[in-house]
Image (spheres, rainbow, N blue to C red):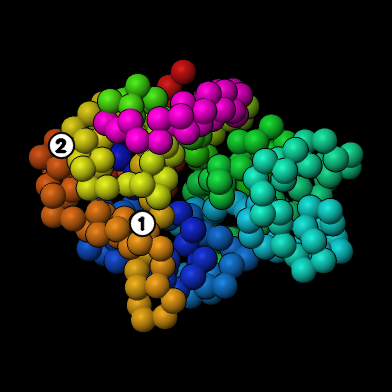
């Protein structure tokens, strides 16, 4: 059976993102989303989640390019005096890895984000990370341990089949190859820890190498090549609702997710849309391809 989770990241980031995700869910193929619990539109996102109970809302853990849940004084130097995480992923990753004593503060912030998510949404079936920081060597063990502690059944592992992706699109070729090396190594390490603690994930993932470059042709090509098992594909949709227009690629992704052609590609190939919550309830073991 071909099962597909279609996730929209950054729920709660802005009203424009919220609108794109809800439209893609109501009118398109999006089944799942990931909430940023400290961002400006998180309360609206939580209200929309209650209005759309079929939308499976996970946690989009933020430790870079965002704001903390805990007060800055409690977790400095993880954040600055205004509660902002670093804006540069490489520098943030190095600081988390090499700064003595920072692990306890990262644990506290990750715990606070999980607990706030549970307060806002009422359940938590899956965790992923902004910029996929949740598989960083300084974070992966923390996230896996907390997922087990809070009985979160699933975690995203960003291991995209590189040869399939290159067969579909060779744009950003150097970037794709670099990301393939980095994220497959990090995903293998995280998978071992997750498997030891009984956590589940998809068998494969798409969307990583084409972040902010996803087109209708790309998604249809993925559907045409989708193998048996459980796949996740993730997007960053948004909708222009009359305020500050979101970036054109995010608006395009909303159109892709609601496209008649994309919906037809899913239906014609016998692909079953599902969620991490359904995977957890099924009790079916699943792990990322080696």
Question: What residue is rendered at 42% in x and 45% in y?
Answer: 211
Instruction: Confirm or deny contact between disc 1 and disc 2 (CB under 8 A).
Output: no
Identify which residue, 282 or 129, lies in the foreground.
129
State left or right for residue 250 relative to residue 198: left
Q: Which residues are magenta?
A: 168-192
- Residue in the foreground of this view, choosing between 270 and 148: 270
Q: In the rendered image, which quarter contains the N terminus?
A: top left
| Residue placed most toward the observer, 148 or 140 | 140
Taking 204 as reference, is 258 above or below it? below
Please name the predominant secondary structure of the magenta segment in the image: helix
Q: Residues within 10 Å of mark 1 (few under 14, many from 20)?
A: some
Residue 50 covered by magenta stretch: no
Question: Dot 2, crowdedness within 10 Å: few (<14), some or many (≥20)?
Answer: few
Report if residue 176 lies within the magenta region.
yes
Please state if 94 lies on the left or on the right of 53 as rendered: right
Question: Residue 226: percent from the left, percent from the top?
Answer: 25, 30
Q: Which residue is mark 2?
A: 270
- The residue wearing badge 1 is 249
């Amino acid at each position: 059976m071909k099962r597909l989770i279609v996730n929209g990241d950054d729920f709660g980031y802005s009203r424009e993102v919220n609108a794109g995700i809800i439209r893609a869910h109501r009118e398109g193929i999006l089944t799942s989303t990931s909430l940023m619990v400290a961002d400006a539109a998180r309360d609206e996102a939580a209200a929309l989640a209650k209005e759309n109970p079929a939308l499976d809302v996970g946690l989009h853990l933020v430790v870079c390019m965002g704001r903390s849940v805990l007060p800055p004084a409690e977790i400095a130097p993880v954040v600055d005096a205004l509660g902002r995480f670093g804006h540069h992923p490489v520098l943030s990753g190095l600081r988390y890895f090499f700064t003595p004593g920072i692990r306890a503060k990262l644990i506290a912030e990750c715990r606070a984000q999980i607990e706030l998510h549970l307060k806002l949404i009422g359940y938590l079936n899956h965790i992923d990370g902004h910029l996929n920081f949740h598989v960083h060597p300084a974070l992966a063990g923390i996230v896996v341990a907390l997922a087990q502690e809070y009985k979160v059944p699933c975690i995203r592992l960003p291991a995209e089949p590189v040869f399939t992706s290159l067969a579909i699109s060779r744009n950003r070729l150097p970037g794709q190859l670099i990301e393939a090396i980095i994220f497959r190594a990090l995903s293998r390490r995280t998978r071992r820890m997750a498997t030891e603690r009984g956590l589940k994930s998809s068998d494969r993932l798409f969307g990583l190498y084409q972040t902010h470059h996803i087109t209708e042709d790309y998604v249809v090509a993925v559907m045409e090549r989708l193998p048996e098992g459980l796949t996740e594909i993730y997007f960053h949709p948004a909708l222009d609702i009359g305020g500050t227009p979101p970036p054109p690629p995010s608006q395009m992704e909303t159109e892709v997710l609601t496209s008649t052609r994309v919906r037809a590609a899913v239906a014609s190939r016998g692909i079953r849309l599902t969620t991490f919550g359904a995977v957890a309830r099924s009790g079916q073991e699943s792990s990322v391809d080696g």
